[in-house]
Amino acid sequence: MIRSIALATAVLTPIAAFAQDLPTAPYLPLDMATTAAQAAVAACSSEGHNVSVAIVARSGETQVLLRADNAGPHTVGSSTGKAFTSASMGRDTTGLAGFIGGNPENGGLRDMDSRMVIQAGGLPIRIGGALVGGIGVGGAPSGAIDETCARAGLDAIGAE
């Protein structure tokens, strides 16, 4: 019995030590992502706008996608692209569009990845200073309104 315990301890100790060395990374839990998306849809709906809202993880993979009743078919791709762009670039899509427009030498950013949509309405999601994803809204009459609804989603989860 003592030999079995000693053997198990000898075999398992290196595994426990190795597991402690694994890196950890912040992430956006599904319930928070869902809350943010619902708040963004509600913000736009309260103003009479039928939009789609996408939340993507830091990896760029879609985590949540909500499409309001009667939102146009283009809104799904628009919201997902804006969210992807914000998560990928770590900045708002309005600022990125201005950066590219004001610096023609950076125009290649538009062609860097076919999933990117560089129009107002995408915001990075930061929690505790860590970039954990992006939110994108598409379908309101202007990008500024899309962005306001996206901001409501971030506010609902206490994101920066």
Image: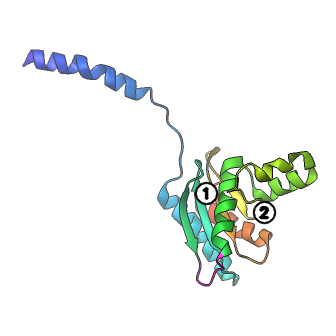
Sequence-wise first label, 1 or 2:
2
- Read off the residue under disc 2: 119
Instruction: Identify whether 156 is placed above or below 6.
Output: below
Disc 2 marks which amino acid? Gln
Callout 1 secondary element:
loop
Q: Which residue is painted at 38% across and 24% down in the image?
A: 18
The residue located at (70%, 55%) in the rendering is: 114
Is residue 69 on the magenta stretch? yes
Q: Please indicate whether residue 56 sits to the left or right of residue 10 in the image.
A: right
Query: At x 70% / y 51%, what residue is drawn?
Result: 113
* Residue closest to the eye, 105 or 51: 105
How many marks the image carries: the answer is: 2
Q: Label 1 amino acid?
A: Gly
Across and down, in percent, residue 91 comes to 74, 51
Residue 96 appears in the picture as rendered: yes
Residue range in magenta is 68-73
Residue 102 percent across, percent down from the top left: 93, 52
Drawn side of residue 144 relative to residue 45, left or right: right
Q: Is residue 40 visible?
A: no
Does 69 appear above or below 136?
below
Foreground mark, 1 or 2, reads 2
The answer to whether 29 appears left or right of 90 in the picture is left
Is 35 situated left or right of 125 in this image?
left
- Magenta span: helix, strand or loop, mainly? loop
Q: Position of residue 89 (x, y in %)?
A: 72, 48
Name the spot of residue 117 as percent of width and height, x first.
Answer: 73, 60
> Tag 2's secondary structure?
loop
Q: Is residue 4 above or below residue 95?
A: above
> How far separated are the C-alphas under marks 1 and 2?
24 Å
Q: Which residue is mark 1?
A: 158
